[in-house]
Image (tube, coloured by chain):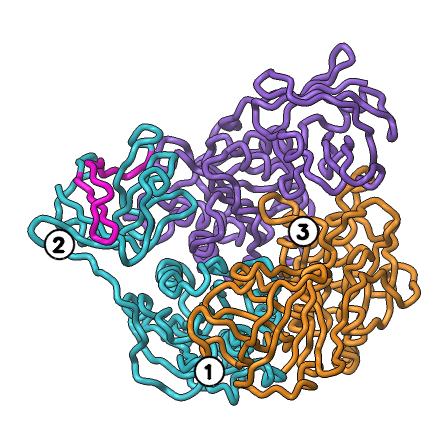
Chain colours: A orange, B cyan, C purple
Amino acid sequence: MVSRSFLVIIICLSLLTGQAQNKILVFQSDFGLKDGAVSAMKGVAMGVSADLKIFDLTHEIPAFNIWEAAYRLQQTAQYWPVGTVFVSVVDPGVGSQRKSVVLKTKSGYFFVTPDNGTLTLIAESMGIAEIREIDETKNRRQGSSESYTFHGRDVYAYTGARLASGTISFEEVGPKLPARVVTIDYQKPVFENGVIKGDIPILDIQYGNVWTNIDGNTFKQLNVNHGDSVTVTIYHSKQKVYSARLPFETTFSAVAIGKPLAYLNSLLNLSFALNQGSFSAKYKIYSGPDWSVEVKK
Amino acid sequence: MVSRSFLVIIICLSLLTGQAQNKILVFQSDFGLKDGAVSAMKGVAMGVSADLKIFDLTHEIPAFNIWEAAYRLQQTAQYWPVGTVFVSVVDPGVGSQRKSVVLKTKSGYFFVTPDNGTLTLIAESMGIAEIREIDETKNRRQGSSESYTFHGRDVYAYTGARLASGTISFEEVGPKLPARVVTIDYQKPVFENGVIKGDIPILDIQYGNVWTNIDGNTFKQLNVNHGDSVTVTIYHSKQKVYSARLPFETTFSAVAIGKPLAYLNSLLNLSFALNQGSFSAKYKIYSGPDWSVEVKK
Amino acid sequence: MVSRSFLVIIICLSLLTGQAQNKILVFQSDFGLKDGAVSAMKGVAMGVSADLKIFDLTHEIPAFNIWEAAYRLQQTAQYWPVGTVFVSVVDPGVGSQRKSVVLKTKSGYFFVTPDNGTLTLIAESMGIAEIREIDETKNRRQGSSESYTFHGRDVYAYTGARLASGTISFEEVGPKLPARVVTIDYQKPVFENGVIKGDIPILDIQYGNVWTNIDGNTFKQLNVNHGDSVTVTIYHSKQKVYSARLPFETTFSAVAIGKPLAYLNSLLNLSFALNQGSFSAKYKIYSGPDWSVEVKK
C-alpha cells in the first residue's frame, strides 16, 4: 500500500508540473539516411533503455545548415507531447569550443544539441527554463573515449536517451549554465506605415511554397479579409525579383490550377503558393537571410 | 473477478470479429521527409496515446499523385495485421468540398483519408464494410481552429490516432455515408481472342522493373509455362514503343545479366525486368493510364 | 512464488549468456523508401508479434551492391544491444541457389540474409558462433507459396520477426550449416617498409568524406602525432589520382574552412575530409575495390 501511494504521488507530481520526461526521443540531423549513422544513434539509445519510443524529425537538414536545424525544431516541437526529448545534431564545429548542452523550455520540452545557433528560435518562442552543459565524464557512451568525431552518437544520442528514459534527471546532465544561447541574427517581422516587412526563413520544399516569418498577428494589422488581394514584393539581396497582387485565401482550390495565392500556412505564417504548382520554381524564389518580403494592401 | 470476466469477453469478441483496432497506425503522404510535417503528425498521434505503434508506408508519393497513393495502399495494406489504421494524406483539393472519411473494409482494415480517389483500389479489392465522414467538431486537434491548411496533422493524423488507440470507436468518427467512394478510371485487364490487354499502373522504381495490372489468374488463360516465351507489346498513348519475345521465368537469374524476362511480381502481377538492370531506363517505359500492354503466346 | 523464481532464473540466464533475442528487429535493404516494400516487411513482422521494436539501418543501399550491404552491417551492428536481429535484403541472386541463412555471432547478434557476400565483414569482425539455413517449409509466411520473388518479405522479414520475438529459437530456424560464409575479396590494410596500404571501402557520402579501411592500430605503426602531417596518395585502378601532405587532426575545425585533413573517423579508421566541404567531390575520389591508398610520414 505504501508503494502504491508513493506511485500515485509521483504520477500526480508529474501531471502537475507537466515537465517530466515522457520516454519519447526525437532525432534530427544532417546525416541523411544512406548510411548507418542514424541507426547507430538509435542503437545506442535502445541500449540505454528498451522502453524508449524513438522517432525522427528529419535527417535531411542540408549539411552544416544550423539555421534550418533551428527552424525545423521550432516548426515541429510544439506538436509533440510535453516532456519529449529532442536530439539535434547539426554540428559544423564538432570538436571545437562550442558547448554541448541540454535546454529545458518553460513548457517542459528538452533539447540536446551543440549550442551553435540551433537553439535560436526555440529559446525565443518557448522560453528558457534552464540550460545545463553535458558533463562528458558521466554522460558519454562507455568505450567511446578514443572516438574523436562522433559526438552525435556517443554524447548527444546517449545523453538524450538517458534523459528521456529517466535514467538521469535533468540536473544530472551536468552543471547549470546562464540562461542564454548562441543565436543567429535574422530579420523579424515589422509593421509600419501600412507595410509589413519580413523574410523567407524556409521553403515548403516538397511543394515549392514560400513561407515567410510574418505571423498571423502581425498580418492582421493590415486588416485584410479572405478574398481580398494584397501586393507582395520579394527582394533578393535588396534587389526586387517579384511583385504582384495576390488573393488572400483559406484554401488552394479557391484559385485556378497554376494560379498564385497568399495564405496562412500550418504555422499561421503568411505564405505564397501556386494551386498544384511550385511558386518557388516558377518565380525562382528561395529562402535564407538574404530573401526579404514586403506586403501591403 | 467480474471485471476480469468482462475483459475476457471483450478480448474474445475482438478475436471473433477480427476487426477491432490494434493500436497500429501507418502513415502515407506526399510530404517527403525533408521537413517537419511527417514528424508533426506523429507527435500529434503520440499526444493522443503513447501506446500507439507508429509506422510509415511511404512519404515519397509524387506531389498530388492520387493514383499512386491509391496503388501503394492496395499494394501494402494486406501485409499488415487486420485492425491496422492507415492515414493517407495526398490532398490536392485540401479545403475544397472533398469529404474527409474513414473507410472500414470487409476484412477489418481502416483508411483515414480525403475521399478524392485515394480509396479507388482498396474499395475494389478489399470491399467496403462501412464509410463514415469525419465529424470535425469532435475529431479535430484542440487549438487547430485557426489553421486552415494542415488537415493532415489536425484532422487525419488526430482522428487516425484516436481510432487506432481505441480512444474513439469507428462509430464515433462521425455520420455514416453511402458505401461508395470517389474513383479514378483505369483500364482493367482483359483476355480476348488470345490476347491479354492491361496497363502499367506503376514502376518498381528502385530497380526499373515494369509492373502491369495483369493478375496471375488472367495471365493463366494464356496457358504459358515457366520457360516458355511470350510476345510483349507496349504502347504509349496508343503508339507502339516496344515489342519483343520474352521468356517467362520464376527467377531473374534464369536469364543472363542484362537480359529481359517476364515474371509474376510479389503481387502476382505480370511484370517485365532486366536481370540486374533497369527495363524502364533501357527501353524508356514508364507508368500511368496512357501506358498499355498487350501479351500473347 | 514458484513462477516468480522461475522468471528470475530465466532473466539471470539471459543476462549470463547475453545472447538471447531482445525483440529488437533492424531492417536493411536496397528497396528505397518510395514504394511499399519496406512497409510490407514491417507489416509482416508486426503480424508475427506486436511486441517487436522495429527499426531501420538503411534502405538506400545502391541496388544489388552486396559490398555496401556488408559494410553497413559491420559499421552499425555493434552499436545495437546484444541479441538484436538484423534482416538484410540485398539479393541480386533472388531465386538462384544462394542459401537463406541466419548467422549468430560470438557476441550474440543475429543476421538474417541471403548468404551472398553480405556476411563477409560481420563474420570477420564479430566471429561466427553458428550458422543455420532457413527451413522454408516452416519459416515462410503463410499464403506466400505462389509468390516467387519477394523473399525479403515472406522469408527474411518473417523469419527475422519470429526469431526476434522468441516465437522460434535459433535452433528452430533450420538445419545447422558449416561455420563459413560466402565472402567478397578485398584489400586488407598492411604496413611494410614505412608505408601503409589499404583501400577505400566507402564514402561518408552525406559530407563527401573519404573513409579508408586502415584501422587505428595499423595507423599507429607510422608513429604520427596529432598536428603532424602525412603524405597521402590515392590510386584508381593503380593510376595515381591524388597526392598531398595532409595534417592529422582530431577535429575538422583545426584547419581552415575548405582545407583538407586526415583524421580517425567514428569507426577509428583513417579518413580524409575538407573542413565544411566535400573531399570526394573536389578531388573526384570515390569508393570500391579499385580505389587504393598509400600513406607515409
- Magenta stretch contains residue B249: yes
**Residue C143 visible:** yes
**Tag nearer the camera, 3 or 1:** 3
Q: CA distance from mark 3 to mark 1?
A: 40 Å
- At which x and y percent is residue A193? 75, 82
Q: Which residue is mark 1?
A: B169
Label 3 is placed on what type of residue?
A: Asp
Front one among C264 and C245: C245
Determine the image quadrant of residue B144.
Answer: bottom right
The residue labelled by disc 3 is: A30
The one nearer the camera, B12 or B215, is B215
Q: Which residues are magenta?
A: B230-252
Mark 3 vs mark 2, CA separation in Å: 52 Å
Mark 2 secondary-structure assignment? strand
Query: On the picture, is A193 further left or further right than C66?
Result: right
Dot 2 corresponds to which residue? B191
Q: Chain of mark 3?
A: A
Q: Residue at x 40, y 67 (%)?
A: B82
* Residue A47 counted in the magenta span: no
